[in-house]
Image (cartoon, helix red, strand yellow):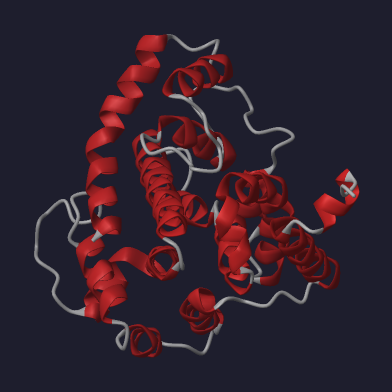
Amino acid sequence: MSSSPLEILSEDPFENALEAFSDTIERDIASRQLTFPTFLDLTIRIKRVCDDPKSSLDDVVRVIQPDALLSARIIRLANSVALNPNGKAITATSDGVRRVGLVNVRALAFAVATEQLAAECRSADSRLIASGLWMHTIDVAAWSSAIARHLRCTNPDTALFAGMISTIGQFYLLARASAHPTLEQDLPRFGEFISLWHEPVARTLLKALDVPEVISTVFDDQDPYGGSWPPSELRDVYFIACLCAETPNPFLQFSPAMRTTLLQAATRDVDPEQLDNLRESARESRDSLLAALRG
């Protein structure tokens, strides 16, 4: 006797795992009691000490210094062309923190955490996807900061931080999925789930982390670009940066041609030569920041 389609579906291990995972995420969002993955621990500790008005620079440095990788990234960023045009070498973590600022320290903490998450994924395919997402994230962050710095329309450090946390929902879902290894058996289907859920998850995370509204509004998919030129708001800078990024988001499979079409549609009233000039003018700063974020 053959099984009905519904019986076959109910016996699908992937579907069962996805349903269980979906229930978990729905409860997380409904209760706003998110279980922060290990990869966010350092980021949260740094945020707390940075937010405390009683904290000194020494307090911030004490939290950072035990993490050699983060310390190295901070010093590397402090010595980048974008932040250190005079070329005076910075070798101490305290001097590096002072140069890059607390906003960039938070951004780098997230960069290091997500890079480690990418390395810890169970399967080779999952590691590849997580690594691709990390590369896309720092690419967008570098473009965001470089464009903001070149146009002087918004704070470059804020733009860098916004770019770094723009994929926080996707990384959270990847980290939480580690408890459901069956999901790694069909990554394209799991990717569809992440594409659907990452925005509400990100909004809940950003609220839990007390991220300022000026940054959280960047991720408003209902009205992603204001249409003015040159970009004058953080969300416009972020939108242009996403389309300028040369490393694709593995969960948003836009072809180069499609990204070009989206960019042209979003900036239809802009002289293409102006846009090309912006990219080329911001590229040196972007490349310097990207190299520092990559380590």
Q: Position of residue 49 (x, y in %)?
A: 50, 84
Q: Quadrant of the C terminus?
A: bottom left
Q: In this view, does 219 lie above or below 36?
A: above
- Whether 218 is drawn above or below 43: the answer is above
From the viewer's side, name the closer residue of 231 and 133.
133
Rendered location of residue 192, percent (x, y) = 66, 44
Residue 106 visible? The answer is: no
Q: Is residue 289 left or right of residue 37?
A: left
Residue 236 visible? The answer is: yes
Figure disc tally? 0
Residue 62 image-quadrant placement: bottom left
Identify the residue shown where x is 47% and y is 57%. 126
Query: Which residue is more in the foreground, 226 or 53?
Result: 226
Q: Measured along the vertical axis of the image, is residue 83 above or below residue 255?
A: below
* 124 left or right, relative to 258: left
Quarter assignment of residue 244: top left
Q: Which residue is drawn at 47% across and 49% down?
A: 159
- The x and y percentages for residue 59 are 40, 90
Q: Is residue 47 above or below residue 164?
A: below
Task: Residue at the far left: name it.
Answer: 88
Considering every residue shown, the one lying at the far front of the view is 1
Identify which residue, 155 or 5, lies in the foreground.
5
- Residue at 54% of width from left, 84% of height from top? 53
Pinpoint residue 136: horizontal percent, then vertical percent. Answer: 42, 45
Q: Is residue 116 left or right of residue 17?
A: left
Q: Residue at x 55, y 11 (%)?
A: 268
